[in-house]
Image (cartoon, rainbow, N blue to C red):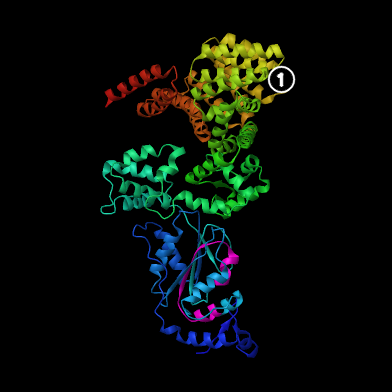
Amino acid sequence: MGMDLRDSRGANIEPKGDVQQQFGDRYNIYNKYIQQTERFPVPHQINRPPKSFTGHKELIDQILKDFEQGSNIIALRGIGGLGKTALAYKLAEILRDRYKDGQLMVDMRGTSPTPTTPAQALSKLLRYYYPAVPLPESQEELQSIYLSTLEGKCVLILLDNALDGHQVLPLFPPDSCGLIITSHRKFPLDGMLPIDLDLLKQEEAVELLLKTARPVSPRALPQEESIWKEIARICGCLPVALKAAGSYLACTPGSSPAKYVKELQDERKRLGIIGKEGVEEDLVAKLSLSYGRLAPETARVFRLLSIFPADFFAQAEEAACLDEEHRNLIELERWSLVDYEGSAEEGEGKYHLHDLVRLFAAGLLEKEEDSDSEFEAWQRYSEHYKDVLSNATEIYTNGDPLSALKIFDLERANIESSWEWAKENLAGSKKAASICSSFLNWPYILELRLHPRDRISRLETALVAAKKLNNRTMEGVHLGNLGNAYAALGETRKAIEFYEQQLVIAREIGDRRGEGNALGNLGIAYKNLGEPRKAIEFYEQILKFHREIGDRRSEGLDLGNLGNAYADLGETRKAIEFYEQILKFHREIGDRRSEGLDLGNLGNAYADLGETRKAIEYYEQALAIAREIGHRRGEANACWNLGLQYEKAGDLHRAAELMQICVDFEREIGHSDAKKDADRLESLKAKLKSRR
């Protein structure tokens, strides 16, 4: 057969005089060798997969299906150490019969300072077919010979560790061949199917660990299963870390899985403890290759990302890292050092740093970033999440508690981390003290999501911060919230002490809103102590104030509190009038938490009137709302009250179930009524048992 030269698009180049003259004598030499390629042994340059290869069964099945359907060019993308090359070897082994004319491989050195050029890669691939012939230097000539040589053949080619599309596009083979690309970097190319490789599943990770640690008998003893799972979790289900950990255990007789997992708990030493036993390059070496390819500004952003303990939105990175339009974050995602999880259909997604990558970045931050830059990044980070909590609280108070709580739950790990930084640095930084104090200025969400004891600890710290700043207004706010936290624990007398301190400060500085809050809290406290007349005095003062300033939301709370006080005085019908007014108002503005409280109060009133069925109806509604918004204290109260009514109705089994929920919660938070209520529940259970 004659030489059929092809261009980069696969179109034939007729070997007319000008072409023959261009190639000179080499034209006849290549023609001769192309005619002889069928005589060469079938090349098998792609390695066998490692014996310990594990996982990705569903992905392998899907890739094979893609090949069957005509997708003959795929790119396996992901972070270093994810097992891209091992998976490529596995696919090549499975596809050997499909590509009967051989398998060729080139290391593209994409993470090296000197990546393989397309011309160098073409020369290496062609050298198998033309071992004794001088090849041209021109990429265009090499590409034409490459395409002509492979035309009609079934050859599988692996381009390992590719850099980008410019590097691999000239190596796209004819349709009869297959091409597998592996890369740390993400890049799109027409005709290429990109596949972002995932971490191993937990059971696959444990299997790989055991194959490496115990190659003769890769099984875990029953008492060890949880330990192996913990090692897999700490290694982040990343194959290179799992193999290193397993190899360490295999060759260190004095170590045991239980001892090793304890050693791995130290984050600062974790990467070193995992080490590089049994692997060509350890995780640090693999990550260093990608890190070394980053532009200086992108590398700076990567180091600073280590301050994020959890997934984050782009706005947070922009704020903390001073990365306009998160351009450097996008580049890190292209290098697979950061993952992006989300889609256009779902709305904005979040970015994720693998735990071991975060430790790698943290080590770089400590070595390469000066302390002032790191401190300023932490400050910007904490300021941002303080604002996130503030915005969520505003959404809450505007009548959308579910959306507000969703925001908090999504961002909780970062909010907690930023609070901890502010707390640790408040003594030496006024900015940190200001952030620390401001965090506890928005109690609504924190009351629903934090244990009262936890709130007390944080509020005490916030109070110290406010005093350091000489911010008397915030001192009063924190004192009032401390009173609320103690009230939630049933320590009403202690709560009153804080409310009275709040009232003194508010009056000293002329903070009328703070004064109103203190009066309202004192009214609730005295009502809970069984002193409704004293409570009414406070409620009427605060109701007058809220009407003067036109604060309808607070006015509604005052009416509800007055209803409670009149209920305690036995004036139940008057109480119901207040409750019905405020229930209508809270439904109008969409305040679900307050609506739940109103329903509970109506249940109490009808229970006092002996209208059990009506009381149950209101309590059930209150319980549904408490569970909907995650208000555990409200859920416990509704369950207890429902239990009492079901007991009256004769359904002791249902009563015991509901009252148990309340007692469990009270024990969990250390509520002062826990023992009394538990005794009451045991009495009910004894009555139930006697009926059986």
Residue 346 lies left or right of residue 158; in this view the side is right
Could you tell me residue 657's position as x and y percent? Answer: 38, 29
Horizontal side, residue 351 vs residue 541: left or right:
left
Q: Is residue 187 magenta?
A: no
Q: Is residue 570 visible?
A: no
Decide if residue 116 is in sight here: yes
The amino acid beneath tag 1 is Arg
Residue in view at x 52 percent, y 89 percent: 2
From the top left corner, tell me how far across and down residue 384 is, in percent: 63, 36
Q: Which span of residues is magenta-colored? A: 145-171
- Vertical relation: 461 (above or below) 538: below
Using the rendered view, name the quadrant where residue 19 is placed.
bottom right
Residue located beneath label 1 in the image: 547
Specify whether 364 is left or right of 513: left
Residue lying at 50% horizontally and 76% vertically, measured from the top left: 126
User: What percent of the width, then of the height, locates residue 209?
Assistant: 35, 50
**Foreground of the two, 646 or 138:** 138
In the image, 412 versus 435, the foreground residue is 435
Screen quadrant of the C terminus: top left
